[in-house]
Amino acid sequence: MKRRPALFRVATTATVSFLTLLGGTGITSASSTAPTSQAASCLQIGRTYRDGNTIIGYGSISCGTGRATIEIWEQIVPGAWRTKRSATVTGPGYDQYVFYNCAGTGTHTFKAVILGSELNGNTVSKHSNQIRESC
């Protein structure tokens, strides 16, 4: 059997679904990368930091017309987190910020997380740095 050049590789249904999620009107390039990895590469997360008593996180979408959520998470115990604040990222081209006032809450570890969804319902995410702060 003759091998096809990379340009003509067959796209899987999952790849087509992913491209549809990102607002693609067709297959512009074929890739053997898993759809989850592709979707995660469209999510961008910034550095989480503190300004006064406010914990600040930010993120964006770098491709397509999908939606995502940027959240600030607080660590409850090692490996367990809870959402403190969230904001919707409605499209590419700008950073969406999320703010949490931690005044009087004690010492905690925080991070920002950006979450997006594929058409098949799988959630993809990227996590920022963690900061430990006494508020």
Image (tube, rainbow, N blue to C red):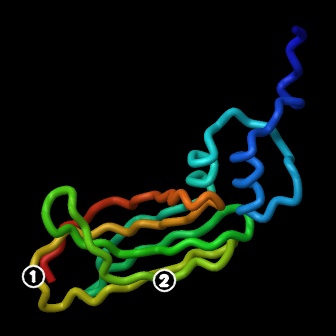
Determine the residue positioned at 24% across, 72% down: 74
Determine the residue positioned at 73% across, 62% down: 22
For the C terminus, the quadrant is bottom left
Toward the top, the furthest residue is: 1
The amino acid type of the residue labelled 2 equals Ala
- Asked which secondary structure carries label 1, the reply is loop
Q: Earlier in the sequence, mark 2 or mark 1?
A: 2
Drawn side of residue 61 relative to residue 51, left or right: right
Q: Which residue occupies the foreground of this view, 13 or 116?
A: 13
Disc sitting over residue 76 in the figure: none
Residue position for label 1: 106
Quadrant in the picture for residue 121:
bottom right
Residue position for label 2: 87
Q: Position of residue 79 (x, y in %)?
A: 21, 56
- Please report contact status of discs 2 and 1: CB closer than 8 Å, yes or no: no
Determine the residue positioned at 64% across, 37% down: 33
Q: Using the image, determine if residue 23 lies above or below residue 95.
A: above
The amino acid type of the residue labelled 1 equals Gly
Observer-side mark, 2 or 1, equals 2
For the N terminus, the quadrant is top right
Drawn side of residue 2 relative to residue 123, left or right: right
Q: Position of residue 16 (x, y in %)?
A: 77, 50
Q: Position of residue 67 (x, y in %)?
A: 62, 73
Q: Using the image, determine if residue 67 lies above or below residue 34.
A: below
- Asked which secondary structure carries label 2, the reply is strand
Q: Residues within 10 Å of mark 2 (few under 14, many from 20)?
A: some
Marks 2 and 1, Cα distance to the nearest angstrom? 24 Å
Q: Which residue occupies the foreground of this view, 45 or 30?
A: 30
Drawn side of residue 120 relative to residue 105, left or right: right
